[in-house]
Image: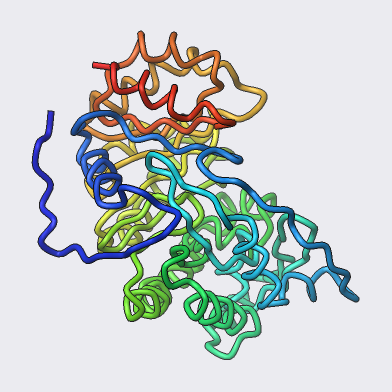
């Protein structure tokens, strides 16, 4: 068991809805190191740990107008956390969101908005067009993320944390520019152009990340985003969902160099491992020293969790941490099959959070 966490570079962030903030952060930092202080960290999903308020309904002329309504987006988040408490390692994090392809949009992709997400419309139809790719600091999507961030920072003091938007450089960004199916053909027909595009999707990533990280740190915020796992340093969630479609050799050739570049300057990296087809590359990913942990997403069609215990143990055996989603009936079997070191549990909470916490405290 780890008994000490180096807190010399930490700072206070008092939040009225988050009891035991410092102890929760110590458990998170132990998890980053694949260790345990007193118990494994727990994130309560849904209404777990706080009372979600009713979302205010509003009409806009277009779906995009709703996503671009800065005041509505932030104030709506505030309504959902009013009067609640975030228990265990559940943190109140608002993160500016225009969808998972927003980083590709900073270079010229148009986003098609839907009620709960958005997608990039591919616009690199000929490889000659790759040379028009350029990060645009006046891009409408980048400016809107800045607006959302600034307004949230004006409203957050004592109430909630502000994170940064969902940034996906590298191969997933290229797939958004080019189209995933076309990109699969390109691996065989235009490999040099693909590698050039990957480099373009990474060249400015650290600059963009640092831009938003500086905005947050200037207002005493930690580094966090949609996963809600914070860091006093730089926390990033790298991913490569496109890897579900390619072989191990192609992953090593096209993806691995970019992944290593993407994660090298971060303090903490939690790899988003989205399903069994992406998990085929786990042995390669485990060799990347700068990846401390994995968010394992088995998906609705790949439950129960117990079938994935060998994968989880493999990650643990490599000295890495893993965040695992459990249905409540699975908790006992899972705790009996896996050691707590390096495990973070994500469970839906509906009034029984204290009971779950007490059970996890006995997991040794």
Q: Residue at x 66, y 77 (%)?
A: 70
Q: Residue at x 36, y 78 (%)?
A: 219
Task: Identify whether 284 is placed above or below 129.
Answer: above
Is residue 254 among what the camera can see? Answer: no
The type of colouring in the image is rainbow
Task: Identify whether 272 is placed above or below 58.
Answer: above
Q: Residue 281, how many percent across, how many down? A: 42, 34
| Residue found at the far front of this picture | 83
Which quadrant of the view contains residue 182?
A: bottom right
Which quadrant of the view contains residue 207?
A: bottom left
Which of the pair 293/87 is nearer the observer? 87
Which of the pair 311/219 is nearer the observer? 219
Total numbered badges shown on the rendered structure: 0
Q: Residue at x 41, y 16 (%)?
A: 309
Which quadrant of the view contains residue 13?
A: bottom left
Q: Residue 178, how many percent across, how many down? A: 65, 63
| Residue found at the far bottom of this picture | 138
Q: Residue 314, how many percent across, how many down? A: 31, 22
**Quadrant the N terminus occupies:** top left
Q: Residue 91, how many percent across, how many down? A: 43, 51
Task: Identify whether 167 is placed above or below 322.
Answer: below
Which of the pair 196/77 is nearer the observer? 77
**Quadrant the C terminus occupies:** top left
Is residue 43 among what the camera can see? Answer: yes
Which of the pair 3/343 is nearer the observer? 3
Q: Residue at x 26, y 40 (%)?
A: 27
């Amino acid at each position: 068991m780890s008994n000490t966490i180096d807190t010399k570079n930490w700072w206070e962030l008092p939040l009225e809805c988050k009891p035991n903030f410092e102890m929760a952060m110590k458990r998170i930092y132990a998890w980053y190191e694949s260790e345990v202080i007193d118990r494994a960290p727990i994130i309560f999903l849904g209404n777990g740990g706080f009372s979600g308020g009713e979302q205010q309904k509003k009409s806009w002329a277009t779906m995009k107008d709703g996503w671009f309504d800065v005041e509505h987006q932030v104030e709506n988040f505030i309504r959902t956390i009013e009067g609640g408490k975030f228990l265990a390692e559940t943190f109140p994090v608002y993160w500016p969101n225009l969808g998972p392809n927003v980083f590709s949009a900073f270079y010229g992709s148009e986003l098609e908005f839907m009620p709960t997400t958005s997608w990039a419309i591919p616009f690199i139809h000929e490889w000659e067009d790759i040379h028009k790719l350029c990060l645009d600091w006046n891009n409408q999507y980048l400016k809107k993320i800045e607006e959302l961030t600034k307004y949230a920072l004006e409203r957050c003091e004592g109430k909630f944390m502000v994170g940064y938007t969902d940034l996906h450089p590298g191969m997933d960004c290229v797939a958004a520019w080019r189209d995933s199916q076309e990109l699969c053909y390109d691996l065989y027909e235009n490999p040099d152009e693909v590698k050039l595009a990957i480099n373009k999707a990474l060249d400015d990533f650290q600059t963009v990340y640092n831009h938003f990280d500086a905005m947050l740190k200037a207002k005493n915020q930690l580094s966090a985003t949609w996963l809600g796992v914070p860091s006093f340093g730089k926390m990033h969630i790298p991913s490569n969902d496109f890897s579900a479609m390619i072989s191990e050799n192609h992953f090593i050739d096209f993806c691995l160099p970019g992944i290593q570049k993407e994660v090298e300057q971060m303090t903490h990296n939690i790899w988003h491992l989205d399903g069994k087809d992406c998990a085929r590359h786990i042995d390669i990913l485990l060799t990347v020293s700068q990846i401390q942990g994995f968010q394992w997403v088995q998906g609705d069609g790949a439950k129960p969790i117990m079938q994935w215990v060998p994968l989880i143990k493999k990650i643990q055996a490599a000295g890495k941490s893993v965040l695992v989603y459990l249905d409540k009936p699975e908790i006992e079997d899972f705790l009996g099959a896996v050691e707590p070191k390096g495990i973070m549990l994500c469970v839906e909470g509906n009034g029984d959070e204290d009971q779950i916490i007490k059970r996890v405290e006995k997991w040794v």
